[in-house]
Image: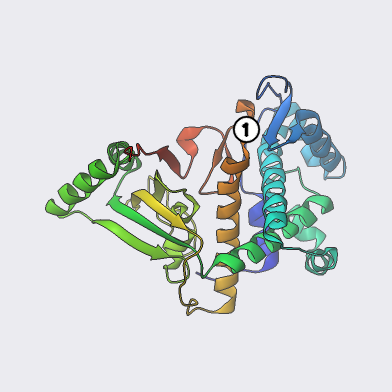
Amino acid sequence: MKAISRSSRLVAALAATTGLLLTGCSTGAGQPNAAAIIGDKVVSVAEVQHRLDAALAAQDPKYLRQQAQNRLDLGGRGLLSMMIRLELLERLAQREGIRVEDAEVDTAAAGVTEEAIQRGTHPAYDRQSVREVLRSELLAGAIGKKYANRTAVVADIVVTGERAEAMAKAKQMAKGPEASERLVKDEKAKGGQASSGERFTFSQASPKLAQSAVFATASDTVVVFPVADESGQMEQQTTPTAQWVAAYVHKRDTNATSAPAQTNAATQAALNRVLGLSMASLYADEIGMRVSPRYGVWDPAGKQLVPNSQEQAAVQLKAVVPRS
């Protein structure tokens, strides 16, 4: 994985998602007009809209012209995704006894120019958002660093060439451990890429696997995800060489012991951020997170909102667990 500049990462973060009509609906009883509910915190549609409007007011007039073209929805989903990530990371960091001081954010923000902000494809971002993105990066990195040598999963793996095929196999695997084992055996007999009960440690995993959703999946859960290419970007289903993985995660362990990764500091820092975000995404299930359907669904691979389940890079299915 290639190391990239902070400004480039920032632009990528600000341009992560597209499309959203900023009209809310109830996400649960007694919570009308909530954009998201994260534990006991409610993020209202009004709050998201206010921040969007404030950012637009300070932007180039070209964005104001988009209002007439019904394109001002471009920033909403990305903005709410950013707010959700930060909230999850703040809560998880507090639980883990991890602190990121304002001075650290100040230092990081000093290196981000207005030009870099303006290069973002969405009109929803301003200096406040920059600080929040950078704070999220720092928190995710610190959390990931703490657990990089302690995280491992045991999983059955089947590799396919298409998303639909991977989904079909995942549904079979989700019927339980025995069904998953039979599928792996059948795949091997046909000459397919499959393995059973493999143990993967985060610190020793390839960058492709470390960035994948397998480390963002809870125990007794089947996950379908695309394999990342060498640049760290997820391959698309339309790419001829794309590979999709269906994985039954039998166990996810954060008390494992593994040797430190033999990689350069920049690459390891980037992977630590990925692990931190993966843990925050898992934490969302632990504390209970709901998002208004108008804003889409949470993607555990991209750690962001996407328009619908068909656009999730990773899909998770709870497996049937035999009664003991």
Residue 30 visible within the image: yes
Residue at figure coordinates x 51%, y 61% from the top left:
254
Residue 270 locus on image (x, y percent): 58, 67
Judging depth in this view, the residue of 243 and 41 nearest the camera is 41
Quarter of the figure with residue 107: bottom right
For the C terminus, the image quarter is top left
* In the depicted structure, whether residue 184 falls above or below residue 295: below
In this orientation, does residue 71 appear?
no
Name the residue furthest left: 189
Query: Residue at label 1?
Result: 290
Q: Is 281 rendered above or below residue 207?
A: above
Position of 53 with respect to 274 (left or right) is right
Q: Residue at x 65, y 49 (%)?
A: 15
Q: Residue at x 55, y 72 (%)?
A: 267
- Image coordinates of residue 226 in percent, x first then y, are 40, 50
**Residue 272 sits in which quadrant?**
bottom right
The amino acid at mark 1 is Arg
Q: Is residue 275 above or below residue 50?
A: below
Residue 61 place in picture, x, y as percent: 83, 41
Query: Counting other residues with Cα less than 10 Å from the Cα at mark 1, is it few (<14), some (14-19), or many (20 or more)?
Result: some
151 lies left or right of 24: left
Secondary structure, mark 1, is strand
From the viewer's perspective, tell me whether residue 156 is left or right of residue 225: left
Residue at point 65%, 32% (across, down): 20
